[in-house]
Image: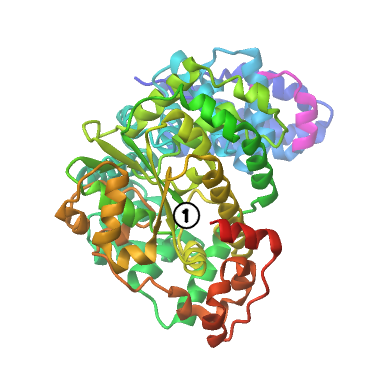
Amino acid sequence: MAEDLYSHIQPEIAKQQFEGIAQQNRKKQRKVEQRLNGIIGQMQQFSAANSLGIYGKARLQKQFSDSLLELGYDEVAKRANDNVPVNIELGHLCSELGSSDQAIAHYRMAVDHEPDNAHYLGYLGIALQKAGLAEEAFDILTRAMMANAEIASVLHGLGVISRDRADYVQARIYLEKAQQITPGDASIRTSLATVLARLNEHELALKHAEKGLKLNPSNRNAHYAVGRILTELGRGEDAIRHFEKTIRQHKSFGAAYDLLARMKKITPADQAFEHFRQANLLQKKSYDVKHARQQFKQMKKVFDSSSLQKYRELGHASEQPVFIVGMPRSGTTLMEHMIASHPRADGAGELPETPRISRLILPEDGQRHSAGPVRAKLTQENITAYAEGYLRVLRQGASNADRIVDKLPGNVFYLGLISILFPNAAIIHAIRNPLDTCISCYFQNFTNIPWANDVAVIGDIYGLYREVIAYWQAVLPEGKIIKVHYEQLIEDPELHGRRMLEACGLDWDSENLEFYKQEKVVRTASLWQVRQPIYQSSKMRWKNYASHMSPLADALSDYLQEERQELADHAIDLAAPSGSSWWNKLRN
């Protein structure tokens, strides 16, 4: 039988240590003692019979947490010192209350005392994962799994991190094992369903998602997962019903609002804009654009023209990767699927592997890193290992294709690294009308882009992106980056589609214009559009929302000067261009 995270608790030790903490307040201690005796009785039953179940465990933990709250967290934490069981319970309490840093500190103390305890490692790894520290979480959870391979929550955490890394094959292994251990866990079923969908096993994915929904009908992620999978299967009306149920149960679930607005094509425009505005307010996150600018400033020092020329000679010879970069919502999905519909090509979706490799070389920790020590990591051995690791992720389910597309738009920041790892790879820059690009970002539900819920921040990011692509065009070999305008592509898909395929070393094939008929993996936030033929309605989309465009147009004024009159016709007065950004526009 699988060992549970709670089966290791020793009731008498916990009682002794808790009594020691409570002794200075005798009146409160009596109340806590009564409650504690009841909890310990349940703990003894659970340790003997493992019979409480998930709700019993949750109730047990809540009662113990309530006892801690009776004394006050600060008082208990101050006196806990190195008492491991008490720190574990404090960690649980802080985790429940959303105090990630405090929870991590308590769990670290326990791990420091018992570094091979799988339960404590599991607690710490999951807390790190919730705090967004995925790399460290993965290492800690791997240690937990090595110590005990039968803890479902540990395997679940490893599966989710692997999924977020786009390592879907490994994620499936972890999640299927976790599901076998605890078949009644709705969240594990739902996570497995999302991975299976990305591996193009949609029917099996739907089965698991529906099972997860049946196990926990109030789980917002389960309804949403069923809806997304149905969308991928082309069952739009069924998907809409699930998104509507998600919103009825969880009115603050902005992601469901977003997809529902897209699929139902809400009109009029003002009503639609308000719908998207509400969705973004519900999901708004903070984002430091200055940090992103500082990070790229350091990147330019590492990847200057001389170092790029020097290290390219150490790169992998593979021509398999094709990188489509730019801003999100700039046509990258259309371009990927036109290429992937070729008999000799395939698409891998948006892979986070290049950013992960970049962080190994140049940490994104807000510190200043000199170029020399960073370049020292670019040895032949490391470059080969990075490239082969990337190819392993790229080739999942498509290892026999001659060309495989990675359409992560954010790879635009890493083109220096990409040109070193894969000097023979094709790089396509997708570019679209600035207003259409940015308003589409605002309207799109992105689960992994923290800046897309604020119009002002989107404008700042767009400016940074144009500076970034201008730099790479200046330092990489001429013609290395192939620019494809989205508007031109949908006007004449064969002409510009041929250009893309030629850049990839592929001949034109008539199937490239019928990508929407193909049963290939859909791994994109634009998934509902992939099932449609090329359409013109997304051109100059901003006009539908002209009354809301002035703030965004001001932020993008350096890149809209050619459209000044058209903007004026829609009552949008454009500011004069600034010097440096205008120069970047000319170079771009």
Query: Residue at left 56%, top 53%?
Result: 465
Query: Residue at left 23%, top 41%?
Result: 345
For the view shown, which residue lies furthest in the front direction?
Answer: 478
- Callout 1 environment at 10 Å: few (<14), some (14 to 19), or many (20+)? some
Q: Main secondary structure of the magenta part?
A: helix
Residue identifier under label 1: 446
Q: Nearer the viewer, residue 257 or 297?
A: 297
Q: Which residues are magenta?
A: 73-86
Q: Is residue 543 above or below residue 201?
A: below
Q: Position of residue 85 (x, y in %)?
A: 64, 21
Asked if residue 357 can be seen in this view, the reply is: yes
**Magenta segment includes 555:** no
Query: Residue at left 42%, top 66%?
Result: 248
Q: How is the image coloured?
A: rainbow
Q: Position of residue 245 (x, y in %)?
A: 37, 64
Query: Residue at left 43%, top 20%?
Result: 384
**Residue type at tag 1:** Phe
